[in-house]
Image: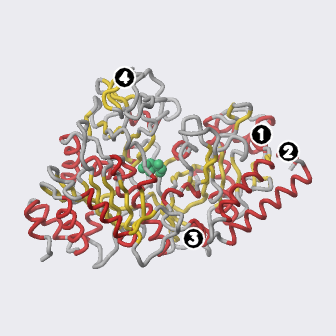
Amino acid sequence: MNKYDDLLKSKMSAESFAKLAALNNDEVMEFVGYAAELCEPDSIFVGDDSGADVAYCRQLAIDNKEETPLSIDGHTVHYDGYFDQARKKEVTKYLVPKEETLDDKLNQIDRGDGIAELESFQRGAYKGRQMLVRFFCLGPVNSEFGIPCLQITDSAYVIHSEDLLYRRGYKAFSNLEKGGEFFKFRHATGEVDERGTSKNYEKNRVFMDYTRNTVFSVNTQYAGNTVGLKKLSLRLAIRKADREGWLAEHMFIMRCNGPNNRKTYLCGAFPSACGKTSTAMIPGENIVGDDLAYFRVIDGEFRAVNVESGIFGIITDVNSKDDPVIWNLLNSPGEVVFGNVLVKDGKPYWIGMGEEIPKDGVNYCGKWQEGMLGPDGKPTTQSHKNARYTVQIDKLENKDPEWDKSEGHQVGGIIYGGRDSDISVPVREAYSWEHGVCTMGAMLESETTAATIGQEGVRKWNVMSNMDFLSMSVGRYLQNNLDFAKDIERPNVFGTNYFLKKDGEYLNGKLDKSVWIKWMELRIHGEADAIDSGCGLIPKYEDLKRLFKEVLDEDYTEKNYVEQFTTNIPELLAKLDRIEKIYSDIDDTPETMRNEMREQKERLEELRALKGDYVSPFSL
Ligand code: SPV
Ligand code: MN
């Protein structure tokens, strides 16, 4: 008998109660019971892995108007509030118990104060609503990688998203040994306006109770704040990985198809707007996952799994020419949740779709008309630039048939993809794991574009593209990366930059990444030569000329090569100075990081003394 049994029985069917009780897990009972007491739902639904329970939640999202069906069968649209269109760093905090200290650069609040504030926002928040209890799994079920998760929410959209994006996990809970670890999430939509969107956006909070493997979120619906298994779990996973000696990364996983049907798996970390999804979806290659990867050493191999089973992708600029696979999926019957797009007469529209977009309809502002200003007095757009689509990997024509492999895939290469207009060559390979982690991953920068708010061309540092999710100091996280898989063969590490410009024009075509990836694949297997550029190894002209012809049927000229692969020493040194300054303020910067930066600087200064500021690859 649990102290909440009577309360729970009074709010749920005997069937729901039986599903909970069958797990025989005190921690589950306590978490569910406390949520029921605090949030005061009218009723509670507990779901297992059955198709009927999944279907119930999907239909509920429509019945309670969190999603609206569109013309194509299986498609729905969901809207988040005008001020709730992305993750919000200011309100995302770690709850720190009195006896603990957390790195002072992390956004944090005293655990007692944080819980008190959070509970004041969640108390009674489920009144008039149904509390949903569901079980999922991060990574493959029945594998070393899997982490069972318990989600509590009053949003059927959150559960529906999780059903598309994650593996079902009720069975994983049934198999959990006594005291077995799991993650848990409690989300409350909070009061809604007439559109059904969370209205108290100034009371939006996302609090990580990291000493209890728990995350709370309130007064928000945007999936990055509410879908517990996505970014909320990543912060917990980074700490669990630290305790257990593995890695939780913000990376895609893809399969590159090499000569003679060779399959090589690559993972990539790219800050937003640096080409992450388009790299994971390169035509002719196969996708495993587009956002989150766990790494473990298994059977002496460096292995990765996709944490997810679906994609929550940015829809802006998805069009039939550049993204045929996604385009087809978004235009065929089957489950798709569109988020924050423009809808007119049951059809979704978004910026950059390559079709004429209506001048009115319903979008992230509500009823919308061209020229309308938002509630903050700012101009509005047809669809939000962070508008999204949610689909299952299984539905993609270009999925790797083995995307769900429970023991993971051996990783051949890791890519760190930045964005700059005048520093880095399109592709380069690190001399070693340490060189790559330090000078590519830990020095990752992305340049703001005209599409982002604020000044154009500002460089933003983002360690492994994981900065927003670090739940420990940068130094410790970096050291974990350096130490990982020490005794085995590690992947080759590459850096990419698709955004070099000359006279304001991009130096690369959108599809050139197909060539870079094939070159990486050959390098991993020792089948292409490379040239030392002082900050990594770059391709030889002859190899690129051949690959451009083979892959894209294009003539790659010596002029192209010189423009793209010149070593820009002043800009590279300025970047080193910029990043060295950042690390000099971080107390636990690994010694290896300092050394790698120093050695890179020395190599570049030596090269400059010999060959000048801008060094053509032909003169190396
Ligand atoms: C990202 O912003 O990195 C995403 C979307 O993948 S979110 O769910 O908001 O994190
Ligand atoms: Mn992401």
- Which mark is first along the chain, 2 or 1? 1
* Crowd class of label 4 (few under 14; some 14 to 19; many from 20; radius 10 Å): some
Q: Which mark is residue 561?
A: 1
Q: Position of residue 459 (x, y in %)?
A: 64, 47
Residue matched to label 3: 476
Q: Residue at x 44, y 62 (%)?
A: 235
Identify the residue at horizontal 42%, vertical 57% (top origin). 92
Residue to which mark 2 is pinned: 618
Earlier-in-chain disc, 3 versus 2: 3
Q: Residues within 10 Å of mark 1 (few under 14, many from 20)?
A: many
CB atoms at circles 1 and 2 under 8 Å apart? Answer: yes
Residue 612 showing in the rendered view: yes
- Mark 3 in CB contact with mark 2 (< 8 angstroms): no
Quadrant location of the N terminus? Answer: bottom left
First in sequence: mark 4 or mark 2? 4
Q: In the drawing, what numbered circle is on residue 395?
A: none
What amino acid type is highlighted by mark number 2? Phe
